[in-house]
């Protein structure tokens, strides 16, 4: 019996890991898509140079983070970071690092923290619902 329990537990952990990976990739791709859409709509090199980012893009990313936190409430903060995970690729693609440097990384960190709180809010809503 004990051997079966260990196998079931390992299978459950593997399944949970796969679901978390899927949620991470979905949030990251959604965040990248929002970033690229805002950049294209605004005609700027960086999404945060436009009012579209603050009026449309960031609220959409907050929604994605909150929804991911609601769906997967365990360690929900990571979904906020996941929403921004692929954006440095878009930001630094074909551009020298010196053009953005520390300022770009600071804004990335600040937005990651804000979106992590949105994901935690989604997890809290799920907890209240139950």
Image (tube, rainbow, N blue to C red):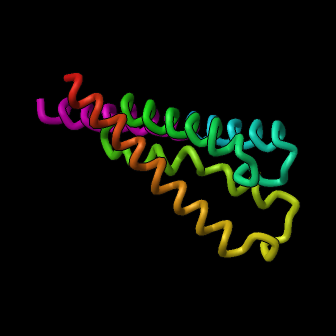
- Residue 7 in sight in this render: yes
Q: Residue at x 71, y 40 (%)?
A: 52
Query: Overall secondary structure of the magenta stretch?
Result: helix
Left or right position of 87 against 116: right
On the picture, is 91 further left or further right than 57?
A: right
How many numbered circles are shown? Answer: 0
Residue farthest toward the left in the current orientation of the protein: 1
Q: Is residue 53 left or right of residue 99?
A: left
Q: Quadrant of the N terminus?
A: top left
Q: In the rendered image, which quarter is residue 55 located in?
A: top right
Name the residue at the top extreme: 129
Q: Is residue 54 left or right of residue 125?
A: right
Where the C terminus falls, by quadrant?
top left
Residue at 81% across / 72% down in the picture?
A: 99
Whole-percent x, y for residue 104 in the image: 68, 66
Q: How far across and how far down the image is residue 31, in percent?
A: 62, 40
Could you say where residue 36 lies in the image, as x and y percent from the top left? 76, 41
Examine the image and state in which quarter residue 71 appears. top left
Residue 21 x %, y %: 50, 39
Magenta residues, start to end: 1-25
Q: Quadrant of residue 91?
A: bottom right
Please name the residue shown 78% across and 72% down the image: 97
Instruction: Choose between 82 and 35: the one closer to the eye.
Output: 35
Residue 115 in magenta stretch: no
Residue 88, compared with residue 37, is above or below; it is: below
Front residue (pair 63, 91): 63
Residue 22: say if magenta: yes
Residue at (84% x, 70% y) in the render: 96
Inspect this view and state whether residue 29 appears: no
């Amino acid at each position: 019996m004990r051997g079966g329990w260990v196998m079931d537990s390992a299978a459950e952990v593997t399944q949970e890991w796969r679901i978390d990976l899927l949620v991470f990739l979905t949030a990251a791709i959604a965040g990248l898509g929002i970033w690229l859409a805002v950049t294209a709509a605004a005609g700027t090199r960086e999404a945060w140079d436009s009012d579209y980012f603050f009026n449309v893009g960031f609220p959409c990313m907050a929604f994605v983070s909150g929804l991911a936190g609601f769906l997967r409430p365990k360690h929900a903060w990571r979904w906020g970071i996941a929403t921004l995970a692929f954006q440095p690729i878009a930001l630094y693609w074909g551009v020298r690092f010196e053009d953005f440097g520390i300022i770009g990384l600071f804004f990335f960190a600040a937005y990651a923290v804000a979106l992590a709180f949105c994901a935690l809010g989604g997890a809290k809503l799920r907890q209240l619902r139950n």
